[in-house]
Each structure stands twice: as C-alpha cells, then as structure tokens.
Image (cartoon, rainbow, N blue to C red):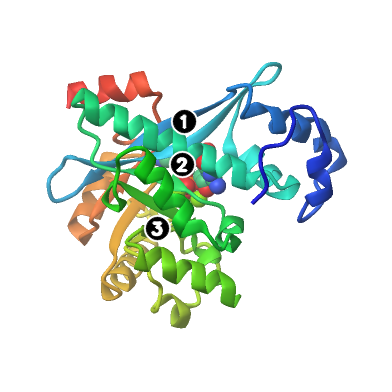
Amino acid sequence: HRKLLDCGTLDVLQHKSCPPDVAELPLAADLCCAIQQHQLQLYYQPQVSVSTGKICGVEALCRWFHNDYGMIAPDKFIALAESVGIITELDFWVLRRACQQLAQWRSQGVNVPAVAINLSSVNLTIEKLPELILEVLHENGLSTDDIVVEVTESGFVEKDFAVKSVINRLFACGIKLSVDDFGVGYSNLSRLQHLPAMQLKLDRSLIEHIDTNPVAKSVSEAALLIGKSMQLQVVAEGVESAAQCEILEDLGFHVIQGYFFAAPLSVEQLEQWLAKQ
Ligand code: C2E
Ligand code: MG
Ligand code: MG
Ligand code: MG
C-alpha cells in the first residue's frame, strides 16, 4: 500500500476508486492533511458482557476535528477516504493509535480487556494485511487476544478469491474478526455460515424497535440464533434504553453496546467512566 502523501497534494485523487463529488474536493484535500496535522482522534465506546455485567472491550471510533468545520462524524469522511484512496492510511493510523492507547492503559493498570477497530472492506484487498496487523500488535507488546477487527457484513461476502484468502489468513493468524452491521447488508446466509469470524454485531436498526414492536423483537431473536448456530459471539449495538437492554439479556445476547451504557467517549471520559463502574 502507498505511503502517506505530501500534505496539501491532490495526487491522491488520481488513485480514486470511485470519484468523489466535486463539492467534496476541498474536504478531500483537507482529509489528506488531517492525519499528519493530528486532527483525527479516537473515541472509545464500552462494550458490556451480559453474563458478568462488566466491560469486555471498547470500540474505537474515529472523529475528525476540522479547523473550520469542527467535529466531523465518520459517516461524512470514511466513504470520502475510500473514494480518494487514503482509507488504508486512515485505518492503519486508527489501528496504531488504538494499540498504543491499549498498551498505555495496560501500563497504567486501567482495565480495558480489548479494543475493536473498524476496517474498511477496501483494505481486505491488501495481501499482506495479516502480517501488517501482527506487526502493529508486536510493536505495542500486544497479542491477537487484545484486538477485534470489525468489517461490515457486505465486506465478508465478497466473491473475490484474493479477498477470501486474506480473510482466511487473518483467521488463521488468530486475528479475531467481527461481522459489523449484520442484518442491513445482503445477508447471504449460505456464504455467511462459512465465515471465519468470532463475532456478529447486529445493526442498530434491528435493535431500535424491539421494545415496542413484537415483530422487531422476533427478527432480532432470529438473527441472534443465526449467530449462535454459527458459534459466534453475538453483540447488540445501538442499545439506548433499559427496556431494550432487559429484552436483549432475556433473549440471550452475549454483549451489549450503546448509549444506554455510554456513548463513544474520549480517553479522559472513558477513564472517568471506568472509575465509576
Ligand atoms: P459502526 O462501526 O457500526 O459503529 C457504531 C456507530 O453507532 C457509531 O457511529 C456509534 O457512535 C453509533 N452508536 C453507538 N451506540 C449508539 C446508540 O445507542 N444510538 C445511536 N443512535 N448510535 C449509536 P459513528 O461513531 O458515527 O461511526 C459510524 C460508522 O463509521 C461506524 O459504524 C463505522 O462503520 C465507521 N467508522 C468509524 N470509525 C472508523 C474507522 O476508524 N475506520 C473505518 N473504516 N470506519 C470507521
Ligand atoms: Mg463497528
Ligand atoms: Mg460499521
Ligand atoms: Mg455497526
């Protein structure tokens, strides 16, 4: 994969996989500098184990603090990073930063069991992906037990042989894969059943109405059973209320993540949250 580009250059646009909107060009140029100018920051959202009631990990979520526009949410810039060809730099910056942070927490005795990072499916085309991830873990004195790599469901059901091979080698290296946003992509169940993953994350849209709509509840239960039948740990994301939480616990979900416990938090906020637990 290509090295970071010079700040301010739009060279990157020549490598685009799908052209960004003209209106987005200035933002695309800014995004190229954002990493170097330390405008990206990670927020961490706690994930709570239903069986213990304790934190079992955090998900690292990227934020962009732009000089003129303030905080920009990932929904606005991940697709842009993909289209201008800097998603590899971005995701690897996130991986490094999250691993450094976890190593720092460990050295400070702060109990964060594991950190999950989001990886764009674009990066599944990098042949040396498993080796590159292992290298970052090694640099930070961490092991494959310490991280989870989340890829959206549609990224997994790729037919491409090279991508399949990367996914299989990630699994063989012991890198734990999580199927993110399950239930909103095109769920090819026949291909999903052979997924080399350890976790299934049900999309928030499947959780949203479980406390008010019996059909929604049944559908989320069905999705849970699919995950369990594939021996996967099943996570409910976007849980916002005690009522939803109680239903998910009764249904037998393994892990719960959402505003009900905590929103994505800055490092300082997370440390305060942990101290209160
Ligand atoms: P995701 O991986 O599915 O992350 C969950 C999203 O749901 C996050 O949005 C989180 O803030 C939000 N969320 C969590 N709990 C709740 C809740 O209870 N209610 C509601 N309404 N929302 C909740 P966020 O941080 O805006 O990220 C959006 C997406 O951007 C992520 O979805 C992920 O796909 C992508 N993303 C974020 N950081 C990265 C990154 O470093 N690399 C890549 N490739 N993608 C990233
Ligand atoms: Mg995720
Ligand atoms: Mg996602
Ligand atoms: Mg998700």
The label on residue 18 is: none
**Left or right relative to 5: residue 93:** left
**Residue 86 showing in the rendered view:** yes
In the figure, residue 138 lies in which quadrant? top left
Q: Disc 3 designates what residue? A: 202
Q: Secondary structure at mark 1?
A: strand
Residue at mark 1: C-beta within 8 A of ligand 1: yes
**Residue 263 showing in the rendered view:** no
Query: Which of the image's four quarters has the C terminus?
Result: top left
**Residue 104 position in % (x across, y down):** 30, 27
Nearer the observer, disc 3 or disc 1?
1
- Which is nearer the N-term, disc 3 or disc 2? 2
User: Identity of the amino acid at label 2?
Assistant: Leu
Q: Secondary structure at mark 2?
A: helix
**Residue 145 position in % (x across, y down):** 26, 51
Residue at mark 2: C-beta within 8 A of ligand 1: no
Q: Secondary structure at mark 3?
A: strand
Residue at mark 3: C-beta within 8 A of ligand 4: no
- The correct choice, above or below, for 3 with respect to 37 in the image is below
